[in-house]
Amino acid sequence: MCMKIQVISIFPEMFPSVLETSMLFKAKDKGIVEFDYINLRDFGLGPRKSVDDIVYGGGDGMLLKPEPLIASIEYAKTEVPKSKIILMTPRGKRFNQATAKQFADDKQNLILVCARYEGYDERVVEFVDEQISIGDYVLTGGELPAMVVIDSVVRLLPGVLGGETSAEIESFSDGETLEYPQYTRPEDFRGKKVPKVLLSGNHAEIAKWRRQNSKKAD
Ligand code: ADE
């Protein structure tokens, strides 16, 4: 089954270079995922296709107006029904590996709404299913966060990663243990040696070393 991911943004041109490279391109090529970039500007108002406006009550900057945002969401929904609508915002729920896994397991189609400028009209939140933040810092728009979410979800879809357990070794059952250090050839690089146990061929000892050297997330 193909997962459809639509992004709504005033800078849709930011996406292809990231989403159509490497693993994500392979996922698309194999028909596991499909991307659609929707230009918010196409839903702008008036001859200038305006998407933003001043802040009621005063304040610097401009806010994204509700009409173009909601019209673009409604358009996306007619193209792909039964999608989960997610607004990228620093005020959203913190995104983590468990949420990425949940989205990948659900395989529900996603509409990722990228806000810009100083923000968006608050009434927009009533039209979305979830609000997601990728961390406690403020970016200039939701585009990079949307790419982070897409990358972390798509690589977990069945058939995307080469090694069958590559996605599993990164995090153990608690979902918080990060990958252990790994080495490739040469055995000795400028005097820095690969830990002996990894060359031993003793699988039990190697597994123990890897467990002991897996970093816990802070
Ligand atoms: N837009 C701006 N900053 C963001 C963040 N940290 N997470 C999600 N969307 C954002």
Image (tube, grey):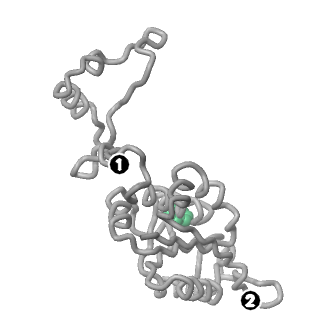
Q: Where is residue 24 in the image (x, y as percent from the top left)?
A: 53, 55
- For the residues labelled 1 and 2, the Cα–Cα distance comes to 44 Å
Which residue lies at the image location 63% right of the left edge and 61% below the top edge?
Answer: 15
Give the amino acid at mark 2: Leu
- Whole-percent x and y of residue 142? 57, 66
**In the displayed structure image, the side of residue 45 where residue 118 appears, left or right:** left
The crowd level at tag 2 (other Cα within 10 Å; few <14, some 14-19, many 20+) is: some
- Disc 2 designates what residue? 45
Residue 40 lies, in percent from the top left, at 67, 78
In this picture, is 77 found above or below 118? below
Q: Nearer the viewer, residue 166 or 91?
A: 166
Q: In which quarter of the image is the N terminus?
A: bottom left
Indicate the secondary structure of the residue bearing disc 2.
Answer: loop
Instruction: Give the number of the mark in front: 1 or 2.
Output: 1
What kind of element bears circle 1? helix
Seen as rendered, the residue at the extreme front is: 30
Residue 209, placed above or below residue 66:
above
The answer to whether 138 appears left or right of 43 in the picture is: left
Residue at the far top in the pictured view? 191
Query: Along the polypeptide, which appears first: circle 1 or circle 2?
Result: 2
Q: Is residue 118 visible?
A: no
Q: Which amino acid does label 1 sit on?
A: Ala
Which residue is under mark 1?
Answer: 167
